[in-house]
């Protein structure tokens, strides 16, 4: 599904990713952990197509195609979705209108008919209910004045509506209370299927109790320095990242 | 630069041509007095130049370099289906239509009106109830001391007349279509509108100023709005005219105690458009809220001119104007609120925000607040910005195409202007119209790098 090979990228001439390899197959859940500033969000944004990154080496293919050649919206049409670490506020844009526009933009790009209003409402209601997202938030402007946790839930709502093939969740768990974490995890699990892949960027092992990853990777200084199964997350929780960096240096 | 002499000639010539045309109205004593007074004033009033404070930022050479002839044509042959595209309300509203500033009887949508309501053309009222006009006319505009207003008065001919007697509530919105047509090239069109709401009366009025194709004309309009005690007027004004036209319109609002004036103005442009709003509070506890949106594109000039005076205590006024500029154009927001010494307990807020979608767009924003009273709540603010890259990215990452994403952010920016509009059908229509124009505008500018 997703194949990243020796990816190198700069931000403002500063190297952030330094030869990153990652292979994600359909149906797999990969967790990416790693210290602050190691490049996790950078990777996520490069996959989603944000401006301002200079790819200096390597390749990213998604479903066999060069992902980096696509515009952000084209990546979405191909099924890439990024739940952002810091979702932006969109003043004056109603959340429900936004959701419908997004959904229809994807459907039209894929040659499907736009969703009708009744069906759409049904789906939003059901999914908001699943995430225990207050329906009032649907009527407000996108993320405007939402609490940190509400923004994260709103990201997951979008994900559930758009049903991506590859969902990248950048610290969706940060800022969620314990109940919300479980609810959001259930939302993500509801999306799991043999065709869908998920990349979870997280700092906390707790999320992985709810969403069981097939692989856990540690990103440090722009490279994946260690990969393992979910036990690696437990080990990291216990020991921190120091021992890995020492090992890598050695 | 056009010489002072040439400027004077420009007005003189219009005046001469127009005087003959205007003579067709039965001359009422007060009307002919008013016209000749205006004619006399016209010769004396200073001409607008870039040196006068009021015209500092206005590009006038295009207008004064063009010749116009007062429009004489009556468009009696217009059919209801000719105007379908320009209506915002449906059959629900009372509708009245003016073509080149002249009333078109065949397009009036009503035969009867509720007790206490007069909706008519100026000419009709002149014929039937001239005394009604003499009471009200010129109460506010008389004091404007400006050549363009004087030109309008000097050739006063037709326009909209609305009168609501005491405590009358207009049960349906009134839709007024001002249609300017290209049949007669380079016409001078000068509607003269008068809206009077007597004590406790209420109304919602929707005005649309529009034109066909590439008509070349100069619309020099004046509206006087008199709100007596506790009267309440909701006023929507949508201006969308030919890219070759010139549009100057002045609205003079006079508010008595406890009256409300809620205005939403959408200026989608002409070649050159300047809208002026003057508000005067006559007593206490009145409220004035204006919302304005201007969209300005390639080769357009657009100006919003606001002049609000609080000279009596305890009135509240709130003004919010937003502009979206695309292409090589110029927009001016020149707003001034004066809170005089006697105006204690006043509230006044003045804000202007601009969104620039093109590097070639030029905006002048000058919100001014002059305060001479100490116990007041006042604020003003202004911003000039561009679309946020992060917001665009967010939308696009959800699959929304660039142009569509830009359109959404632009309409999001504009949304605040419509937030208080109670007529939802109308709000939706105006916003849809806006979206259509934005998409076209963004498509046009898509060659340029926006962010
Ligand atoms: N636009 C930018 N300009 C300058 N530096 C940047 C920019 N974006 C990212 N960086 C730098 O790149 C590095 C990696 O940032 P990134 O956000 O990818 O880290 P992260 O692994 O997601 O960290 P965290 O766990 O704190 O979210 C950091 O040193 C950051 O300061
Ligand atoms: Mg991060």
Image (cartoon, coloured by chain):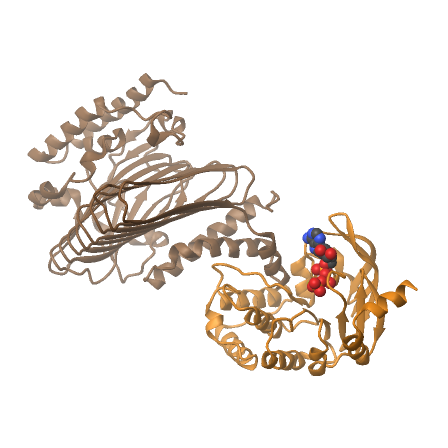
Chain colours: A orange, B brown
The tally of labels here is 0
- Ligand 1 image position (quadrant): bottom right
Looking at the image, which is closer to me, B100 or B445? Answer: B445
| Residue B450 seen in the current view | yes
Q: Image point 31% across, 33% down: which residue?
A: B187
Residue sitting nearer the eye, A3 or A86: A86
**Above or below for B275 versus A21:** above
Q: Is residue A37 left or right of residue B396?
A: right
Q: Provide residue A201's location: percent of width, then percent of height.
A: 72, 70
Residue B446, percent from left and from top: 59, 46
Q: Position of residue B312 (x, y in %)?
A: 20, 46
Up-down: is B76 above or below A22?
above
Q: Quadrant of the N terminus of chain B?
A: top left
Residue farthest to the right? A250
Nearest the eye: B364 or B87: B364
Residue B152 spot, x, y in % from top left: 23, 33
Looking at the rendering, which quadrant does residue B274 occupy? top left
Instruction: From the viewer's perspective, tell me whether residue B237 is left or right of residue B102.
Output: right
- Does residue B161 appear anywhere in the picture? no
x 47%, y 50%: residue: B437
The residue nearer to you, when weighing B182 against B422, is B422
> In terms of image quadrants, where is residue A231?
bottom right
Left or right of residue B83: residue A168: right
């Amino acid at each position: 599904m997703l194949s990243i090979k020796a990816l190198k990228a700069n931000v403002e001439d500063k190297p952030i990713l330094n030869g990153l390899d990652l292979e994600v197959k359909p149906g797999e859940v990969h967790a990416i952990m790693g210290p602050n500033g190691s490049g996790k969000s950078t990777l996520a944004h490069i996959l989603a197509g944000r401006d301002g990154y200079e790819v200096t080496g390597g390749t990213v293919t998604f479903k066999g195609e060069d992902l980096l050649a696509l515009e952000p919206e084209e990546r979405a049409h191909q099924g890439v979705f990024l739940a952002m670490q810091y979702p932006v506020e969109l003043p004056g844009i109603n959340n429900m209108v936004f959701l419908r526009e997004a959904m229809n933009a994807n459907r039209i790009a894929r040659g499907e008919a736009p969703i009708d209003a009744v069906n759409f409402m049904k789906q939003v209601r059901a999914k908001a209910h699943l995430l225990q997202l207050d329906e009032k938030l649907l009527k407000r402007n996108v993320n405007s004045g939402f609490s940190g946790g509400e923004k994260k839930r709103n990201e997951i709502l979008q994900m559930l509506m758009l049903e991506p093939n590859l969902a990248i969740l950048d610290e969706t768990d940060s800022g969620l209370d314990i109940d919300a974490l479980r609810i959001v995890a259930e939302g993500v699990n509801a999306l799991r299927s043999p065709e869908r892949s998920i990349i979870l960027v997280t700092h906390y092992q707790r999320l992985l109790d709810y969403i069981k990853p097939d692989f856990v990777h540690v990103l440090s200084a722009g490279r994946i320095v260690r990969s393992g199964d979910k036990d690696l997350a437990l080990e990291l929780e216990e020991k921190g990242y120091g021992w890995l960096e020492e090992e890598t240096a050695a | 630069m056009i010489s002072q002499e040439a400027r004077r000639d420009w007005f003189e010539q219009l005046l001469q041509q127009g005087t003959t045309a205007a003579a067709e109205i039965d001359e009422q004593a007060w009307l002919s007095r008013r016209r000749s007074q205006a004619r006399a004033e016209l010769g004396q009033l200073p001409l607008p130049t870039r040196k006068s404070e009021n015209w500092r930022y206005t590009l006038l050479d295009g207008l004064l370099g063009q010749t116009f002839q007062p429009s004489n044509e009556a468009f009696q042959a217009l059919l209801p289906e000719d105007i379908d595209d320009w209506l915002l309300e449906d059959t629900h509203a009372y509708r009245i239509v003016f073509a080149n500033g002249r009333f078109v009887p065949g397009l009036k949508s009503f035969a009867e009106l509720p007790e206490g309501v007069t909706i008519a053309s100026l000419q009709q009222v002149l014929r039937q109830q001239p005394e009604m006009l003499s009471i009200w006319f010129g109460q506010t505009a008389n004091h404007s001391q400006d050549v363009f207003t004087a030109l309008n008065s000097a050739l006063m001919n037709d326009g909209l007349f609305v009168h609501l007697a005491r405590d009358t509530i207009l049960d349906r919105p009134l839709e007024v279509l001002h249609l300017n047509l290209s049949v007669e090239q380079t016409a001078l069109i000068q509607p003269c509108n008068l809206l009077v709401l007597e004590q406790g009366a209420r109304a919602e009025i929707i005005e649309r100023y529009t034109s066909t194709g590439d008509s070349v004309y100069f619309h020099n309009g004046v509206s006087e709005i008199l709100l007596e005690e506790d009267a309440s007027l909701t006023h929507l004004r949508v201006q969308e005219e030919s890219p070759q036209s010139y549009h100057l319109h002045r609205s003079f609002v006079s508010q008595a105690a406890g009256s409300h004036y809620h205005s939403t103005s959408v200026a989608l442009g002409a070649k050159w458009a300047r809208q002026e709003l003057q508000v005067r509070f006559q007593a206490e506890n009145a409220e004035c809220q204006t919302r304005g949106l201007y969209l300005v594109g390639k080769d357009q000039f657009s100006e919003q001119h606001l002049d609000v005076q609080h000279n009596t205590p305890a009135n509240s006024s709130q003004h919010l104007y937003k502009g979206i500029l695309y292409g090589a154009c110029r927009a001016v927001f020149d707003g001034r609120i004066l809170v005089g010494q006697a105006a204690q307990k006043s509230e006044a807020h003045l804000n202007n925000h601009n969104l620039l979608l093109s590097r070639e767009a030029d905006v002048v924003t000058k919100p001014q607040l002059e305060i001479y009273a100490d116990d007041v709540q006042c604020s003003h603010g202004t911003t000039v910005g561009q679309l946020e890259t992060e917001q665009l990215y967010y939308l696009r990452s959800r699959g929304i195409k660039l142009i569509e994403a830009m359109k959404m952010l632009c309409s999001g920016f504009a949304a605040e202007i419509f937030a208080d509009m109670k007529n939802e059908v109308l709000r939706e229509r105006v916003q849809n119209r806006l979206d259509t124009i934005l998409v076209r505008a963004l498509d046009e500018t898509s060659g340029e790098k926006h962010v």
